[in-house]
Image: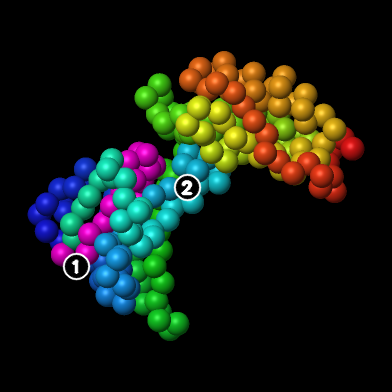
Amino acid sequence: MSEVAEQATAELKMTITESAQDYLAELLEGQDDDVLGIRMFVNAPGTPKAETCIAYCREADIDEEDTLVSYEKFTARFEARSIPFLEDALVDYAKDRMGGQLTIKAPNAKLPQVNADSPIEDRINYVLFNEVNPSLAAHGGEVSLLEVTDENIAILQFGGGCQGCGMVESTLKDGVEKSLLEQVPELSAVMDMTDHTDRSHAYFK
């Protein structure tokens, strides 16, 4: 790894081992010319559903806020929002009888790391997973964030006992929406996009 890459990776406080670098470079060699390298990010960071991902990076995937690291054999981009959750992450490759396996260990991916400067999605997820869902769990339900629109409307989806539940409108207005609007003041509204016609698991039918 180049000196520049070592410095950038050190700032990221994560490690891609040499064996993993070789393996990723080998995968990239077999891709089309539109693949520019890899991109690493965490889906739903800071929540129990966090998933650390490495994907092929094309022009459409690039965000100008990404951190760029040039390794000896390939280029990697790291999503800015995910960087705090990638601290102490380890990407490794180990050969075995089946050929080998790439492993990603990110011990901080699921840990809430939220402050006033955190992205709005992270602050919404913090409220949902640490305050709202523990209450909904008593009825076997949960709610998750699908997206935040350009108008700062939080689009939510209910699951478990909340899907198809006769009390979900009250839960949304009196509980979820109230908590989110109080703690994430930038939000203009909260919308439920759940298909409530499926009532098979509903707590109140």
Question: Could you tell me if residue 109 is visible in this image?
Answer: yes
* The stretch drawn in magenta includes residue 74: yes
Residue at image point 31% right, 50% down: 62
Q: Which numbered disc flags the more N-terminal residue, 1 or 2?
A: 2
Q: Quadrant of residue 142?
A: top right
Secondary-structure class at tag 1: loop
Q: Is residue 161 above or below residue 114?
A: below
Indicate left or right for 182 with 30 as reference: right
Q: Are marks 1 and 2 in contact (CB under 8 Å)?
A: no
* The stretch drawn in magenta includes residue 7: no
Secondary-structure class at tag 2: strand
Question: Could you tell me if residue 201 is visible in this image?
Answer: no
Q: Which residues are magenta?
A: 72-91
In the rendered image, the quadrant that contains the N terminus is: bottom left
Q: Which mark is residue 73?
A: 1
Residue at image point 47% right, 31% down: 150
Indicate left or right for 157 with 116 as reference: right
Residue at image point 76% right, 38% down: 162
Q: What residue did someone put label 2 on? A: 43
* Colour logic: rainbow
In the rendered image, the quadrant that contains the C terminus is: top right
